[in-house]
Amino acid sequence: MKKAYLILQNGKVFEGWSIGAEGETIGEVVFSTSMTGYVENLTDPSYYGQIICQTFPAIGNYGIMREDFESDKMQVKGYIVRELCDTPSNFRSQGKLDDLLKEQNIVGICGIDTRELTKTLREKGAMNGIITDSPVLDDKKKKALDEYQIKDAMDNVSCKQEKVFESQGKQKFNVAMIDYGVKKSVVQKLTKRGCKVVLFPHTAKAEDVLAIKPDGIMLSNGAGNPEDAKFEVEQIKKLIKSDLPIFAICKGHELLATAFGAKTYKLKYGHKGNQPVKDLKSDRVYVSSVNHSYAVEADSISDKVATISFRNVNDGSCEGLDYKGKKIFSVQFRPESCEGEMDTGYLYDRFIENMEDKK
């Protein structure tokens, strides 16, 4: 294996070994606390422009399963692990993670102290980093590292034209979904519940969305800074006036809140992986799956407009909103991930109930 180095924007250098594709890469370094689901992480469009550090030390032990991809390709800029397993063991495995990284042209590094890296990001905040073959950067690379920004995220992760996904079994509802970087599993949760899903690109106009006469509208997860999505927010304002049931998750949650007048802010190091969230109505805590760098500023939205439905147990940030007098609600986390009877998949059922009531 070849030596490789992760150099952070603050000058901190980590020495390790090259994995995945040859070359170097620059991105925003973030960490994910998930113990499993590395294939889903790598193909999640919400990670566009970022280099993921997995906090769990051993990655790749159950191989790769292409049916678990959340999009057509890996969306990350780079990958960081403590130990990369070269001998996966799982009846579903279709190969080694390192081979997939090479196939998808993803540059990575292993063998570094990921605990130290995670502590650095928690204390200093998410920052740019470069995975390269030299511990010293020349002026050109240093400039590129300092100036790196995630740009045109939605343009790169959203579909380019409408897509139709038929319901599994008898069709009960017609759902319009706006794609800000949707995960495959989000669509599946609706089609399994008898919904035909028409997926629209993020550039779609509200009039085109409403033209299909949907029973409900879903605003998907996605990538990028919500403050850059001015066109998308204006379209959501028009969709709100339709009085149709709306369910929004992750990026959709942020954009929906913005359409109602709320403000968003960038978290110090983001919530990525697993986070405890409390349902304020039931007083019950769920371990949720999350991947967001931004959050809704809870105090920026009037309690006459919406009530906070979920809060993050660790930092108290807003994780969900219910809008008063409307069949509209949203969550910051991912209710489609690892759904089980103890998890938050019931939120999809709530969306279904809202559409039933509206009919």
Image: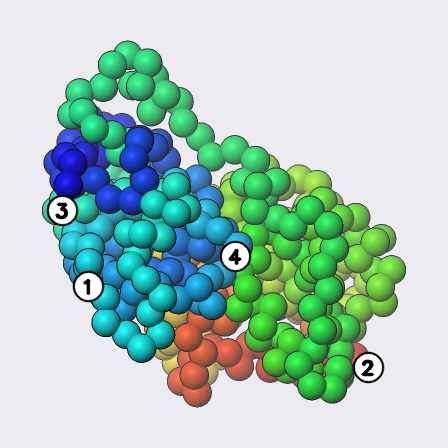
Residue 172: x %, y % from top left: 75, 83
Return the residue at label 2. 359
Quarter the N terminus occupies = top left
Q: Nearer the viewer, residue 164 or 67?
A: 67
Density class for disc 1 (Cα within 10 Å; few <14, some 14-19, many ≥20) is few
Q: Residue at x 66, y 39 (%)?
A: 230
Q: What's the distance in space between the residues labelled 4 and 1, CA to CA?
A: 25 Å
**Measured Cα–Cα span from mark 4 to mark 2:** 32 Å
> Mark 1 belongs to which amino acid?
Thr
Q: Position of residue 291 (x, y in %)?
A: 42, 56
What residue does disc 1 label? 87
Q: Secondary structure at mark 3?
A: loop
Q: Which residue is mark 4?
A: 71
Closer to the eye: label 4 or 1: 1
Mark 2 or 1: in front is 1
User: Disc 3 and disc 4: Cα gap in Å?
Assistant: 28 Å
